[in-house]
Image (cartoon, rainbow, N blue to C red):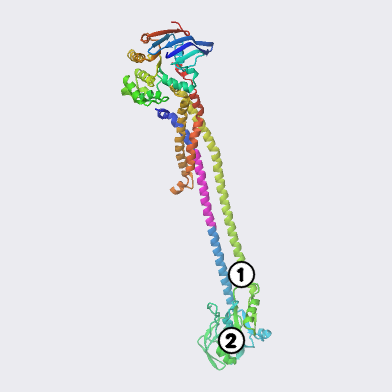
Amino acid sequence: MLLSVTDAQKIYPSASGTVRALDGVSLELGAGEFTAVRGQSGSGKTTLLLLAGGLLAPDGGTVMINGQDPYKMASDARAHFRSTEIGFVFQQFHLIPYLSVLDNVLAASIPTHPADAKQRAAQLLAKFGLEHRLHHVPGQLSVGERQRTALARALLNRPKLILADEPTGNLDRENAEAVLGHLTEFANDGGAVLLVTHDDEAASRAKRTIHMAAGKVVE
Amino acid sequence: MNVWRLVVREIAHRKLNFLLGLLSVAVAVGSLVGAMTLVRGNELRTGELLAAKQADVEQAIVEKEKEVAAAGVALNDAMRKITKGLGFNILILPQDQDLNELHVEGTASKSMPEKFVTDLAESRIVTINHLLPIVSKKLRWDEYDRMILLTGTRGEVPQAHRDPKKPLLDHVPAGTMVLGYQLHKQAGLNVGDTVTLMDREFKITETYPERGTADDSTAWVNLAEAQEMLGMQNLVNAILALECNCATQDRVAEIRKDIAAILPGTQVIERGPPALARAEARNKAQATAAAALQHEQAAGREALERETAGRQLVEKQTEDFAAVLVPVVMIGCGVWIGFLALMNVRQRSNEIGILRAIGLKSTQILLIFLGKAILIGLTGALLGYAAGYLVGVSWSDFATTSVKSARLFEPRLLLLAVIIAPLLSGLASWLPAMLAARQDPAIVLQGD
């Protein structure tokens, strides 16, 4: 199993006491699986995604990624683990504004230093139709191009798991299709994709859809 | 791709933030370097001024010494001339000459061998000079019906061990006569006239103006002729001399002792101003000159001390000002750098979040911010040093030439600036950098 979340609990403090963002969520994701997580805002989707990505420690339960519990690692070891095992794609892209498209993708190589980083980055960008944008900064790109750049960054270190939080939320249909197509291709090549989305069309590309409400998996 | 590329790209992207930091460090380093350059310039200028002042004082003292020496020489010369003007003041007489008779009659009645003067001239005596042997006798000049003092002289006898001196009394050639004032005035005689004395003819070659002494009634003729006329061949009545111009307590006693050793059958008396009084006058003049020299030296030293104290006061004021200004500027700069770094961290929270998400370690995040601070410190130090040096050089009254300006360049200060400024800049940015390194990426990413 690439991702195994068991009875995950996450509680946030709030003005009125506490909010149980995750309440006993369990989830498994194997190689080649493309799973969508749907639910209302505040249902705990993003919390589940961050917890699955080794970014947010659970208050209860366990998270195993490719057989290892990242939360038992030291902070820097966990960061390095993330860089090799997980790729992130966000709705807001989170590209670094002062780096070129190529450098934004290569930023993912800072923790890992792969020898072929530049070559692979160029290949990915060419594959995503961005070969003419290598030296442009994000401000000069369309939203679709930005998301494809973010996707190329997520794939640079050949992760086994892609965690995507509303990756098509800001895209038009054509660009959304392109991004979903690449995610599907990644899953078909043996990777695992966990996609958080409100979009029916996006969810329809997943082999499995999980519905969440009030921090629980309801369907 | 590495962290430093991120640092450089971010600097290029957020130029204002970098420039504000750079300006701050440059101002701090520039203040320090400018102040140090000014202080150094003041020190060098002080040294320069004091050296010049010292040279002036020494030159003035040398000049004064020369003046004093010249005055001393002039005084001695004047004293010598005065003494010479007074005429021969040492009288060497036969030992059996009655001095009472001499004073009453005005001439010596006893005689001594003329050879004595040769003995004296060939001796190494230094206490007297200008040796003049004479025969002298008071007699009646029948042709003009008056008493005169006839003096025969052969002129001064040169001393073997001394350079020839200009004679006080010229040689009177045979057949000629020199007349004192009263003689030529009363007899109506002039230069060129021929007169007869004791059946001998003499041509008058010179007449003296009034001296107010026995010289006014004296007729000078050649010594040999006078000796013949008076029946005193190879004899003289006296040897006149001039004592040397030397400072001593009892010159006459020394002269008597020296002459007694050479001419045992003689006696010595001094005429005119006493030697002791002359020596005292000379010593007094020398003491006055020495006091003037001492006064000049003291005045020079005092002027030098005043100049030193004045320059030291200016230096201290500059140093005190720098001691207050530099820490204030450096603290202000540190606070400003820290503030800018904090703003930078807040501005880049999303970037930090994603960098953490894609696997950058907290130490790498720390390095991104500290690296920027170090670059600001290093560049600011170089620019600040250049600016401070230029300001220091342009304000310093020492750096009047390019060579002097180069002397104000201090490599050690530059080295210190490029080490300390990045360190302080890094230190000022440490807290914001730590905040960045500890930032939880989940908080940022949850915002989506």
Q: Residue furthest bottom?
A: B199
Asked if residue B356 can be seen in this view, the reply is no
**Residue B190 place in picture, x, y as percent:** 52, 86
Label 2 SS:
helix
For disc 2, the chain is: B
Sequence-wise first label, 2 or 1:
2
Q: Nearer the viewer, residue B246 or A193?
A: A193
Do marks 2 and 1 share a chain?
yes
Q: Quadrant of the C terminus of chain B?
A: top left
Residue neighbourhood size for the residue with mark 1, other residues' Cα within 10 Å, grouped as few (<14), some (14–19), many (≥20): some
Q: Amino acid at mark 1?
A: Arg
Residue indicated by mark 1? B282
Asked if residue B163 can be seen in this view, the reply is yes
Label 1 SS:
helix
Left or right of residue B230: residue A158: left
Left or right of residue B197: residue B264: right
Seen in the picture, residue B226 relative to B124 is either above or below; the reply is: below
- Number of numbered callouts drawn: 2
Q: Is residue B8 magenta?
A: no
Residue stretch in magenta: B31-57
Q: Nearer the viewer, residue B219 or B313?
A: B313
Seen in the picture, residue A49 relative to B74 is either above or below; the reply is: above
Q: Is residue B50 magenta?
A: yes
**Residue A216 place in picture, x, y as percent:** 47, 8
Residue name at image x 39 percent, y 8 percent: A208
Q: Amino acid at mark 2?
A: Lys
Seen in the picture, residue A134 relative to A191 is either above or below; the reply is: below
Q: Quadrant of the N terminus of chain B?
A: top left
Residue indicated by mark 2? B115
Residue name at image x 62 percent, y 79 percent: B90
**Residue B143 place in picture, x, y as percent:** 57, 92
For disc 1, the chain is: B
